Image (cartoon, rainbow, N blue to C red):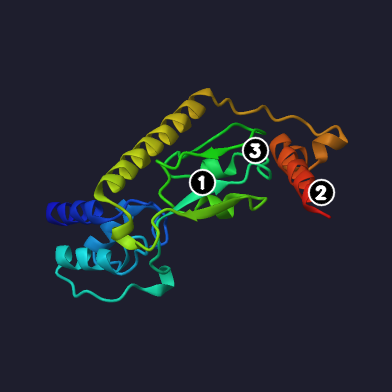
Amino acid sequence: MPRQEDLADRIDAALPQTQCTRCGYPDCAAYARAIAQGEAGIDQCPPGGEDGVRRLAALTGLPARPLNTQHGAEGPRGVALIDENWCIGCTLCIKACPTDAIVGANKLMHTVMPEHCTGCKLCIPACPVDCITMENASGTATGWSAWSPEQAGHARARYARHQERLAREEAEALEKHVPPAVQPRTSAAAEAPPEATDPKKAAIAAAMARARARRAP
C-alpha cells in the first residue's frame, strides 16, 4: 500500500539509524515498516529515547508512552573502543558492525573509526576475548539530544553501503562457487568432523588460548 509505504519511510527517517536491533528488528527500516503496519509499538527504540517516542507519536497519531524497558534504557551515545593489548584479530567484530566502522585484517589488531560508530554495541558480544568497551561520547546528553540528524543521516548512508557491499560479495562468491566433488572417505582425516579441520576456527581457538594465557597470573 503506497500510503503505508510512505508512512514507513517517514518513520524510518525519524529513527536514529543506529541499526542496533534492540527494537527486536534487524534494522531501523524493518522496525519502521513494522510500526507502519501496526505490528510494533513506537516505544521500542532506546537510542531514540523518550524524545524519539514523541517523534513517532506525532508521525503516527498514536499516543506517546514511556520507553519500553524490555528493549533497553535510554542512555548517552557510546563509541566502541578496542583494547589493542587483547585483540586477537579474529575479524568477528568487523562482521558484526552494521556501518563498517571497524577496520583491520585477520590476525592483526583492529581499530574503530569513531566518526562512523553508531554505538550499536553489536561488536561487544561478537568479541571472543572481551576486548571491546563502550566509551561515553555525549556526556549527560541522552537519546536524540546525544545524536544529531546529521549523524543519523551519515549512519543511514554507511549502513546502505554496508548492505550493498554484503550483497556484492555474496554475488561474487556465488559466481566463483564450484560444488566440491564427492570423495570416498579413505582416511582418518576424512572422517574428522568439519570443525576439527577448519583452519579459521583453529586459528581463533589458538589466539583465544594465547589471550587467556596472557591474562592468567
Q: Tag on residue 89?
A: 3
Which residue is tagged 2? 213
Q: Residues within 10 Å of mark 1 (few under 14, many from 20)?
A: some
Q: Is residue 3 above or below residue 72?
A: above
Of helix, strand and loop, which one carries label 2? helix
Say whether disc 1 or disc 3 marks the residue closer to the N-terminus. Answer: 3
Q: Quadrant of residue 49?
A: bottom left
- Residue contact between numbered discs 2 and 1, judged by CB atoms under 8 Å: no
The amino acid type, in three-letter code, at marker 3 is Gly
Say whether disc 2 or disc 3 marks the residue closer to the N-terminus. Answer: 3
Quarter of the figure with the C terminus? bottom right
Residue 79 pos. (x, y %): 46, 50
Q: Is residue 50 above or below residue 157?
A: below
Q: Is residue 137 above or below residue 186?
A: below
The amino acid type, in three-letter code, at marker 2 is Ala
Residue 12 pos. (x, y %): 25, 53
The single residue placed furthest to the front in the displayed view is 139
Q: Is residue 155 or residue 161 the one in the foreground?
A: 155
The residue under the point 26% across, 57% down is 33
Residue 64 pos. (x, y %): 22, 74
The residue under the point 23% across, 55% down is 14
Q: Quadrant of residue 193?
A: top right
The amino acid type, in three-letter code, at marker 1 is Ala
> On the picture, is 173 further left or further right than 151?
right
> On the picture, is 72 further left or further right than 64?
right
Q: Tag on residue 96?
A: 1
Say whether disc 2 or disc 1 marks the residue closer to the N-terminus. Answer: 1
Quarter of the figure with the N terminus? bottom left
Q: CA distance from mark 1 to mark 3?
A: 14 Å
- Residue contact between numbered discs 1 and 3, judged by CB atoms under 8 Å: no
> On the picture, is 182 further left or further right than 127?
right
Q: Residues within 10 Å of mark 2 (few under 14, many from 20)?
A: few
